[in-house]
Image: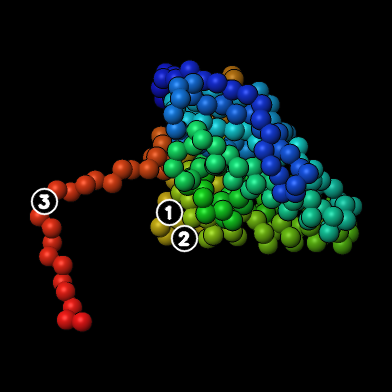
Amino acid sequence: MAPNAPTFAYREMSVELPGSKPDIRIEGYYTRPSPEGKYPCAVILHGKGGWWRAYIRYARALAGQGIASVIVNYYSGHQVDLEGLYVPFDERRAQFEYQNGDISAAVAAFSRYPVCSGRKVGLIGFSLGADKAFRTAATQPDIGAVVGYYGPYDYVSFIRQRVNPILLALAGENALKWKAYLEKNSPYTQAGRVKASALLFHGVEDTTISVKQSILMQRALERRGGSGARMKLYEGVGHNFALRRRGTKAERDDSIRLTISFLKKKLIEKKKKIVSGKRKPVARSGL
């Protein structure tokens, strides 16, 4: 099912957001509905390939339905070599944690934009960005909702799927420390710290990141109790189906429609009802 026809025109511009250090500025692309007012807000986190025009199309679809967003280019603050075998472990871990800090700082700054209604924002992550979204939600209580598209969540099984065992057998100390760090600190192991509700999407035919990753993550999130974790799987599509212009339109449009509904439900604060009638008597103590 396609998303509803746009209700709002939109405005968009490049912005800068603070990073994890005073001298770091993070590039962002801000899109909002044109009419003045406050709207639910979401931060969009790109995948491993960086951000490109398809993310802007996604942001425009959100704005057309009354959701403001900023695409955060988290590569603009700190770069991390995720796969190199010879990068010094301490250096790589530091850059990785600075990058995660950049995202947290940018999210906090965007949540204070005048356009944002309520006290919480949503996160929408694609592939590696879905990993980043859950890492951020595990450390920030002001996240009200997380949408994860085909992310890597459990690094024990993900590394087993992606990395040739011969390479692991030949890997040096730095690479093995990095592997152990990712496995210990994966989104899957941090799921219990995520307070936000979650919505997961994955293509069943994904050969880049197995659909098993989303299945495992949903189970981990469900074990938290309280906040829900929904998942929608799409038959016949693979990785990046939400960003492709051809061949996956039905699945892309359906995921956007569900995302918009989910974000509005979780981020728009309900007004408290004033109940008229007689007051209940107040018990008085003898003191």
In front of the other: 69 or 50: 69
Distance in Å between CA atoms under marks 2 and 3: 39 Å
Q: Give the answer, above or below, for where 131 lies relative to 188.
A: above
Amino acid at circle 1: Ser
Distance in Å between CA atoms under marks 1 and 2: 7 Å
- Using the rendered image of the protein, determine whether residue 240 is visible from the camera's viewpoint: no
Residue 224, label in figure:
2
Which residue is pictured at 14% across the width and 48% down the height?
276
Which residue is pictured at 78% across the width and 56% down the height?
93
Q: Read off the residue under disc 1.
A: 227
- Crowd tier of the residue under label 3, counting other residues whose Cα lies within 10 Å: few below 14, some 14–19, many 20 or above: few
- Crowd tier of the residue under label 1, counting other residues whose Cα lies within 10 Å: few below 14, some 14–19, many 20 or above: some
48 vs 32, left or right, is: right
Q: Give the answer, above or below, for where 191 lies relative to 3.
A: below
Dividing the picture into quarters, in which one does residue 94 lie? bottom right
- Crowd tier of the residue under label 2, counting other residues whose Cα lies within 10 Å: few below 14, some 14–19, many 20 or above: some
Distance in Å between CA atoms under marks 1 and 3: 33 Å
Amino acid at circle 3: Gly
Residue 277, label in figure:
3
Residue 84, label in figure:
none
The percent position of residue 68, horizontal first and vertical second, equals 51, 31
Of the residues under marks 1 and 3, which one precedes in the sequence? Answer: 1
Amino acid at circle 2: Arg
Nearer to us of marks 1 and 3 is 3
Which residue is pictured at 20% across the width and 82% down the height?
287
Assess whether mark 3 and mark 1 are in contact (beta carbons under 8 angstroms). no
Assess whether mark 2 and mark 1 are in contact (beta carbons under 8 angstroms). yes
18 vs 57, left or right, is: right
